[in-house]
Image (cartoon, rainbow, N blue to C red):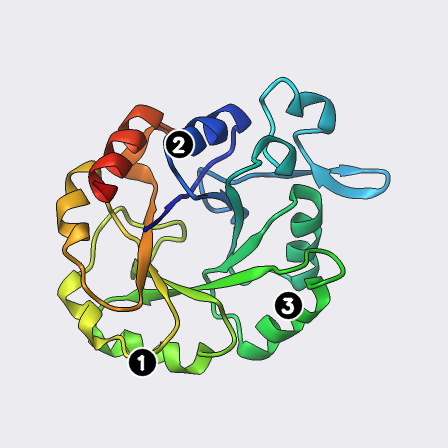
């Protein structure tokens, strides 16, 4: 079962959750989020605000500090060029889209990045769930994305920390694997193990495992993963 830890920013913390057993680390590039990973201007354009010399000190986040864990960039209705820049600068393996991105935009983005910038780039499309009808939105993206992420619908960008009714998952009938997200906490491991949907691939965890915004409790993550996979 895939475990994605979203809302990460510090290389040392990414290494810690990797050691805890996480498969994916999410870097949030949505400015509204308290977990936003910012960029700074340079004479040559936009660069990560954690320059190379700080990777060795464990303060930055990027491919140099994340070997063995899949780096996922989280975006919402961003300009394709901004996404491409971050894929290149951060060595992202996967792009997660949380807005109203069209299939045309997604296809063009993939063609631009793969293979020249990031060979084998994967794309996750978030679907915001408030009722069973929301799973019908997936049909539009079938064949255009590699995975769905089902999150709780809310007004705020960046998540609500609340769960939707997981019994509604039986309304999903497409053949694309999905991650379950939205308010998942340490106490949910046993319930998650009982999910039997054939396309269920794993979970996305975030705020319920934090000591501060973008700082994850690696011990809590490790205990959750151990119970999830036992």
Tag on residue 136? 1
Tag on residue 213? 2
Residue 146 lies, in percent from the top left, at 48, 67
Side of 73 relative to 201 (left or right): right
Q: Quadrant of residue 41?
A: top right
Q: Is residue 42 above or below residue 102?
A: above
Mark 3: secondary structure: helix
Q: Quadrant of residue 152?
A: bottom left
Give the mark nearer the N terminus: 1 vs 2.
1
Mark 2: secondary structure: loop
8, 64: nearer the viewer: 64
Side of 198 relative to 66 (left or right): left
Question: Number of callouts in the render?
Answer: 3
Q: Most extreme residue toward the right, as rendered?
A: 43
Distance of label 1 from label 3 (alpha carbons): 23 Å
Side of 43 relative to 165 (left or right): right
Tell me what residue is drawn at x 64 percent, y 68 percent: 110
Q: Residues within 10 Å of mark 2 (few under 14, many from 20)?
A: some
Distance of label 1 from label 2 (alpha carbons): 33 Å
Tag on residue 88? none
Tag on residue 110? 3
């Amino acid at each position: 079962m895939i475990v994605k830890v979203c809302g990460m920013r510090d290389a040392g913390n990414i290494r810690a959750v990797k050691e805890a057993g996480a498969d994916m680390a999410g870097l949030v590039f949505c400015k509204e989020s308290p977990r936003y990973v910012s960029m700074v201007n340079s004479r040559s354009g936009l660069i990560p605000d954690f320059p190379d010399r700080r990777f060795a000190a464990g303060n930055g986040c990027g491919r140099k500090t994340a070997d063995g864990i899949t780096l996922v960039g989280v975006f919402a209705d961003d300009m394709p060029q901004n996404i491409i820049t971050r894929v290149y600068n951060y060595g992202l393996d996967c792009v997660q889209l949380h807005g109203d991105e069209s299939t045309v935009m997604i296809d063009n983005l993939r063609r631009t990045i793969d293979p020249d910038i990031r060979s084998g780039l994967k794309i996750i499309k978030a679907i915001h769930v408030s009722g069973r009808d929301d799973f019908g939105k997936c049909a539009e993206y079938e064949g255009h994305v590699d995975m769905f992420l089902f999150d709780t619908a809310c007004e705020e960008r960046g998540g609500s920390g609340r769960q939707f009714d997981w019994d509604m998952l039986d309304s999903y009938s497409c053949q694309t694997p999905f991650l379950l997200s939205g308010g998942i906490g340490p106490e949910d491991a046993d319930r998650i193990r009982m999910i039997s949907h054939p396309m269920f691939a794993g979970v996305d965890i975030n705020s319920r495992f934090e000591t501060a915004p973008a700082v994850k409790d690696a011990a809590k993550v490790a205990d959750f993963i151990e119970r999830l996979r036992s």
